[in-house]
Image (tube, rainbow, N blue to C red):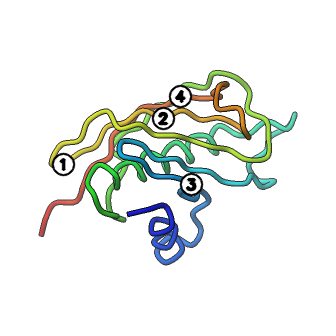
Amino acid sequence: MNADEVNTMLAEHFPGAGANCAELGATYAVASTELGELSIRPGSYVSGPTQFAIADAALWYVTFVAIGRIEPMALTSELSIRFLRPAQGKRIWARADLATATRRSVVGSVSVWMDDHSDRPTAVAQGTYVLPRPE
């Protein structure tokens, strides 16, 4: 499985999804997207919901890594986010790192940043994805 396969699934099943899969590793996934006008608030700040959405996308992609397959019906069980500093820039990134995976859920932590400033996170998140029951 690679980022191109995830992006193909997104284009097929979720054409309105804003965050592309940029990279998959053994225990992590990276999501990224160019920002549009709807994501920008007064002062040129990136909205909280935009940061939340990319954190959620990265966590979804790391779920695929954890289970070894693309599972479109994996669902967010919970996700909490802490905003650290104002986010300004053209491209938003999020990296989800796998914490643990069980038969029914995947837990991970996420760092969100702008442009090439991965050393200056704008938000951090932690969340859980649940997997569909086997048929």
Kind of residue at badge 3: Ala
For marks 3 and 2, the one nearer the N-term is 3
Describe the element under mark 4 as helix, strand or loop.
strand
Q: Earlier in the sequence, mark 1 or mark 3?
A: 3
Is residue 8 found left or right of 71 in the rendered image? right
* Residue ID for mark 4: 124
Q: CA distance from mark 3 to mark 2?
A: 14 Å
Q: Amino acid at mark 4?
A: Val
Numbered mark located on residue 3 in the image: none
Q: Which mark is first along the chain, 3 or 4?
A: 3
- What residue is pinned by disc 3? 22
Q: Are marks 4 and 2 in contact (CB under 8 Å)?
A: yes
Picture quadrant where residue 50 is located:
top right
Q: Amino acid at mark 1?
A: Arg
Between disc 1 and disc 3, the foreground one is 3
Residue 110's disc is 2
Residue 2 % position (x, y): 44, 62
Q: Nearer the viewer, mark 4 or mark 3?
A: 3
> Residue at left 42%, top 53%?
61
Discs 1, 2 touching: Cβ within 8 Å: no
- The amino acid at mark 2 is Val
Extreme residue toward the front, this view? 26
Residue 104, disc:
1
Q: Are marks 3 and 2 in contact (CB under 8 Å)?
A: no
Q: Nearer the viewer, residue 113 or 82?
A: 113
Q: What residue appears at the point 36 percent right and 42 percent down from the top-left corner? A: 27
